[in-house]
Image (spheres, coloured by chain):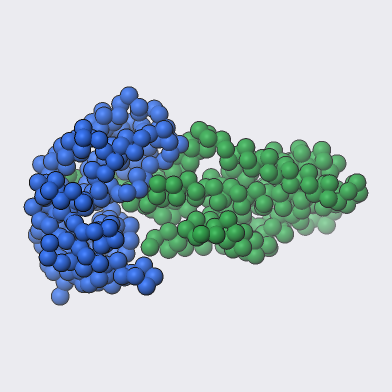
Amino acid sequence: MSAPRPIGVLRTTLVLMRKDLLIEWRTRARLNALVFFAMATLLLFSFALGPDTRLLERNAGGYLWLAILFASVLSLGESFRVEAENACLDGVRLAPSDARAIFLSKALGNTALLVALGVLLIPVMVALFGVKIVLGLGDLGLTLVLGCLALSAPGTVYSAIASNARARDVLLPLLLFPLIVPSLLAAAKATTLVLQGDPMHQLGSWFGLLSGFNLIYWGLGFLLFPKVIED
Amino acid sequence: MPPSSLGTALAFHDVSKRYGRTWALARLTYALPAGRSLLLTGHNGSGKTTLLRLVATALSPTAGQLQVLGRDSVTERDAVRREVGLLSHASFLYEDLSAHQNLVVLGRLLGLESPEDAAHALLTKVGLTRRSDSPVRHFSAGMRKRLAIGRLLMKKPALALLDEPFGELDPAGIRDMEGFIAELKAAGVTVVLATHLIEQGMTLCEERLHLQDGRAVAA
């Protein structure tokens, strides 16, 4: 019997992303859980800090990114739980599929989910913390996309590593949080500038920094992921 | 010198596999001639599944050299994967996708021209047409096994690795599975079959390899 013709990295990525979206659509469990978890986190920040509206307003960008970060741990872990069930990741690997395509599909899928979550959280943040978006929505959108990209790439690599560990729920944040501190700081700072205005024109520098982190995270993830999932 | 790959479907040369401190397979040297089928026997934990996973390239050998269909299992891994189909204890099936969707995803990964049609034909072949749109989560163990063999057949492998293919099947399912294996052999596919049902396996395979504690021993 003749072996089927192999497909490339890009096409494999699209096939796997389509499959993940289909699973997400059929269950909708992950998105629902993420939205409620992240909204509860924002609410808890506002309760914990009391009625000091100036404090809440000043730090709103940081709270938004902490809510996204905490929710991302749930989201990233869940993305590989689906693959662990019935050893589906082995099935995809042995199809065969390029491991780099598996990384791209998971990381892009996680980014899309976190961006969608961020879009839902922004109106909640505006309502809870009484913030105004001084710069345009375009700048806020770009911050959201760059920040979520910076969370997803290392998060995908680490959730693949953690998925085989016994204490995977603890291991993922332990590995991920120290690594993404610089990009989280940049995303929070850029969001604060978008919300409160940017008289010193610093926003471009933070965007540049986030883009640099993304280049490193995505490049390393693309190169290292095959080592992570192969024996 | 490693055994010659010419005229051999599988060539193990001093192949070992270790998990932590346990040697699951120890210095196995064996050659399966092309066109012959192999029955793999041995008690639980004797190394049968590890051997199949090594041949499928789901694992890499800790030591030694393994050639599959004339290709090195480590340096030519993707080429080996394209030619080998594995029916494993794990079904490789997505629980939240339907039987049809599971096969279509694989068909797309394989680059088939019409994965939907191929999936439909295979579901008919394995007797799951009526449940093709049901999520796998609602399937019985036997139905999962049928879908898993459909998944293997979709790949049109040159080498089929079957790990306990008769487990969880009812008598009709076992007869169907024997039919699928006979069809594979008639199509020139080399079959490696691991089972505890030795008499059944002997009727399907010409060669036998008995494993004990990861070593080949006389049956």
Image quadrant containing the C terminus of chain B? bottom left
* Depth check, front residue: A195 or A67: A67
Side of A61 relative to B89 (left or right): right
Q: Residue at x 22, y 72 (%)?
A: B27
Side of B187 relative to B99 (left or right): left
* Residue A169 picture quarter: bottom right
Reply above or below: B51 against B201. below
* Depth check, front residue: A205 or A162: A162
* Depth check, front residue: B172 or A161: B172
Whether residue B83 is visible, yes or no, is no
Reply above or below: B54 against A137. below
Q: Residue at x 68, y 49 (%)?
A: A68
Chain A: give its colour.
green
Residue B55 horizontal/vertical position (percent)? 25, 58
Q: Residue at x 30, y 26 (%)?
A: B129
* Residue A204 picture quarter: bottom right
Whether residue B164 is visible, yes or no, is yes
Side of A155 relative to A20 (left or right): right
Reply above or below: A154 against B167. below
Residue B147 horizontal/vertical position (percent)? 31, 37
* Residue B101 picture quarter: top left
* Depth check, front residue: B148 or B67: B148
Q: Residue at x 50, y 60 (%)?
A: A165
Q: Which chain is blue?
A: B
Reply above or below: B15 against B99. below
